[in-house]
Image (cartoon, rainbow, N blue to C red):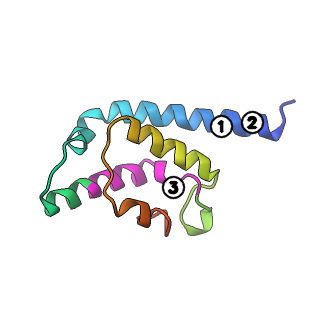
Amino acid sequence: MYSKHVIAAQEHDRILDAFEDALNAAADQLADLRTPTRDLGKQIAKFSTLMNWLFDGGWIRWGWPEEVGGLGGSSILRCEILERLACAATRFPTTYKYLRSSDPRW
């Protein structure tokens, strides 16, 4: 019988693998996010595309309690998802770091 920690680690890895698969599958959809722009309207549109993709896929909801719209799990998992997103050269708006600390629905 596996311990809770082993099961949790397996689930953690499964979620990260699923995220990598989803990120690869959405490469064309998210390609524009890798291109910088100085136009504020375009920046907001790109940010909206990214946030919708992350939220609709449930990715950004990991690490937040279910009571506030999250899926539970560790905040470390959420950080690893964001790290993988950054490693894929996806640009984040500066405001992202503030929104992420307030609510999973942003």
Position of residue 75 measured from the top left corner of the image (x, y, whole percent): 60, 53
Label placed on residue 61:
3
Label 3's element? Answer: helix
Give 43 or 56, whichever is nearer the viewer.
Answer: 43
Amino acid type, mark 2: Ile
| Lateral position of residue 91 relative to residue 106, left or right | left
Q: Is residue 60 on the magenta stretch? A: yes
Query: Residue 31 occupies which quadrant of the picture?
Result: top left
Residue type indicated by callout 1? Glu
Where is residue 1? Give x, y as percent: 87, 30
Query: Where residue 67 sits: x, y (%)?
Result: 61, 68
Q: Is residue 96 magenta?
A: no
Tag 1 residue: 11
User: Is the stretch drawn in magenta largely helix, strand or loop?
Assistant: helix
Q: CA distance from mark 2 to mark 1?
A: 6 Å
Is residue 58 visible in the rendered image? The answer is no
Q: Please state the extent of the stretch shown in magenta in the rendering.
A: 47-63
Q: Nearer the viewer, residue 75 or 13?
A: 75
**Pointer 2 or 3: first along the chain:** 2
Tell me whether circle 2 and circle 1 mark residues in contact (CB < 8 Å).
yes
Q: Which residue position holds label 2?
A: 7
**Residue at 55% across, 52% down:** 62
* Crowd rating for badge 2 (residues with CA inside 10 Å; few <14, some 14–19, many 20+): few
**From what the image shows, is residue 13 above or below residue 80?**
above
Instruction: State how far apart marks 2 and 3 are (Cα).
Output: 20 Å
* Residue at screen point 53% across, 48% down: 79
